Image (tube, grey):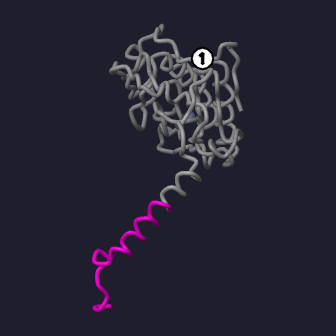
């Protein structure tokens, strides 16, 4: 190979390589699913900024700067939440103010009593898989903006009990009887206080977490699956 001159010394070859590269890039663009905007916000209403209960009154939370992106992602009353009631979060959640109170209510009034009945102990923490995230629903390019883009949704992947036992949505949904019953009960009883509740039965995108959101639908309907 020592007899072959470098590509840069062969103008024709260099041009041919440049043209081939450009063609490949163009082909990649025209067939790519990532062309156009990542999501649409058509028909979506951001959550209200006003909020009845300050998250810092019901947990460990601090007000942060509101989020307003030019592409439509926005959190009109943004808070960073580490803990609600007796339940710690595995990582800080960025949420719109209005999410905190129903989440607190569900944890205290549904999750804790259900954990006591199912396992004889309390939940001490939950694994947060996602909170604010500026992305389309189910990460499908070109779809509607996810409620995560409004800080109006939370994804919970697991519940950890006092003993250290961890109930994950991925394993527990089809796990032992007590885990199955616990997860289905907390899923079902989130419906109503949250406007959208999605779990593993809703499809592959939610096989490993519960999604809870407060989508601000004009007709006030709820969707739980
Ligand atoms: Zn989600």
| Magenta stretch, main secondary structure class | helix
Q: Quadrant of residue 214?
A: top right
Q: Quadrant of residue 12?
A: bottom left
Percent coordinates x, y for residue 186 in the rendering: 63, 30
Magenta residues (range)? 1-23
Q: Is residue 107 left or right of residue 58?
A: right
Residues 15 and 58: in front is 15
Give the total of numbered labels: 1
On the image, numbered disc 1 is attached to which residue? 216
Residue 21 counted in the magenta span: yes
Task: Specify the quadrant that holds the N terminus.
Answer: bottom left
Residues 67 and 102: in front is 67
Q: Residue at x 59, y 35 (%)?
A: 137
Percent coordinates x, y for residue 15 in the rendering: 38, 69
Residues 139 and 209: in front is 139
Q: Secondary structure at mark 1?
A: loop
Quarter, ligand 1: top right
Q: Is residue 31 left or right of residue 99?
A: right
Residue 155 vs 222, above or below: the answer is below
Residue 102 vs 181, above or below: the answer is above
Q: Residue at x 59, y 21 (%)?
A: 44
Residue 62 counted in the magenta span: no
Percent coordinates x, y for residue 222 in the rendering: 69, 21
Q: Residue at x 49, y 29 (%)?
A: 149
Percent coordinates x, y for residue 30 in the rendering: 57, 51
Residues 31 and 10: in front is 10
């Amino acid at each position: 190979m020592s007899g072959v001159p470098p590509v840069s010394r062969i103008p024709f070859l260099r041009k041919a390589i440049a043209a081939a590269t450009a063609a490949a890039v163009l082909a990649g663009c025209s067939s790519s699913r990532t062309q156009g905007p990542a999501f649409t916000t058509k028909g979506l209403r951001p959550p209200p900024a006003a909020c009845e209960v300050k998250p810092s009154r019901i947990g460990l939370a601090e007000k942060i700067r509101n989020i307003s992106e030019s592409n439509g992602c926005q959190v009109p009353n943004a808070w960073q939440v580490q803990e609600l009631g007796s339940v710690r979060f595995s990582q800080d959640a960025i949420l719109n103010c209005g999410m905190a109170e129903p989440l607190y209510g569900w944890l205290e009034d549904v999750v804790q009593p259900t954990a006591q009945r199912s396992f004889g102990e309390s939940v001490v923490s939950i694994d947060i898989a996602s909170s604010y995230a500026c992305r389309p629903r189910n990460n499908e390019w070109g779809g509607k903006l996810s409620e995560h883009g409004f800080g109006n949704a939370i994804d919970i992947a697991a519940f950890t009990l006092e003993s250290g036992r961890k109930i994950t949505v991925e394993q527990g949904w089809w796990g032992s009887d007590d885990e199955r019953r616990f997860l289905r009960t907390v899923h079902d009883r989130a419906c109503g206080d949250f406007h959208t509740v999605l779990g593993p039965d809703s499809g592959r995108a939610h096989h490993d977490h519960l999604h809870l959101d407060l989508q601000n639908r004009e007709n006030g309907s709820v969707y739980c699956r």
